[in-house]
Amino acid sequence: MNKDAAVTSFVLGILCVIPLLNWVLAPLAMYFGIRALRSIRKDPQHYGGKTFAIIGITLGSAVLFFNVTGKLFWEDDALYPDYPRNVLMSLFS
């Protein structure tokens, strides 16, 4: 039974928590997971690893979601424009 794409998705899903690589690894985890699920659906006797594929897709999409929301709301100071910067500046100055 071939589980290569599913295990690749799982490993990339775990590795996508690395800060600088997560923008690349999270979409790759999702891609390989979806590819594995499609292969499993077409030929379940030849392909396996459905759980690995689902976990890889879930981890990749969660990391990508939190990265995008973090970029939108926290790094651009949309929610709390002065709070983090002023508190840190008052502590160290």
Image (cartoon, rainbow, N blue to C red):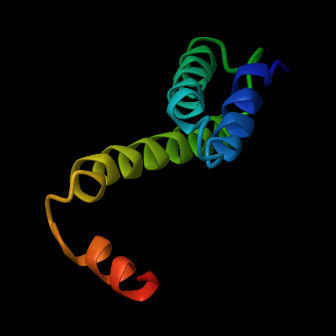
Q: Is residue 7 above or below residue 65?
A: above
Number of numbered discs overlaid on the protein picture: 0
Q: Residue at x 79, y 24 (%)?
A: 3
Q: Residue at x 74, y 38 (%)?
A: 11
Q: Quadrant of the C terminus?
A: bottom left
Q: Is residue 6 above or below residue 44?
A: below
Q: Residue furthest bottom?
A: 91
Q: Is residue 37 left or right of residue 50?
A: left
Residue 82 or 69: which is nearer the viewer? Answer: 82
Residue 22 or 65: which is nearer the viewer? Answer: 22
Instruction: Identify the image quadrant of residue 24.
Output: top right
Q: Residue furthest right?
A: 1
Residue 45 percent coordinates (x, y) = 75, 18
Residue 7 percent coordinates (x, y) = 76, 32
Q: Residue at x 85, y 20 (%)?
A: 1
Residue 69 percent coordinates (x, y) = 29, 51
Q: Is residue 74 above or below residue 68?
A: below
Q: Residue at x 70, y 42 (%)?
A: 15
Residue 19 percent coordinates (x, y) = 59, 46
Residue 7 or 39: which is nearer the viewer? Answer: 7
Residue 86 or 42: which is nearer the viewer? Answer: 86
Q: Is residue 39 left or right of residue 34?
A: right
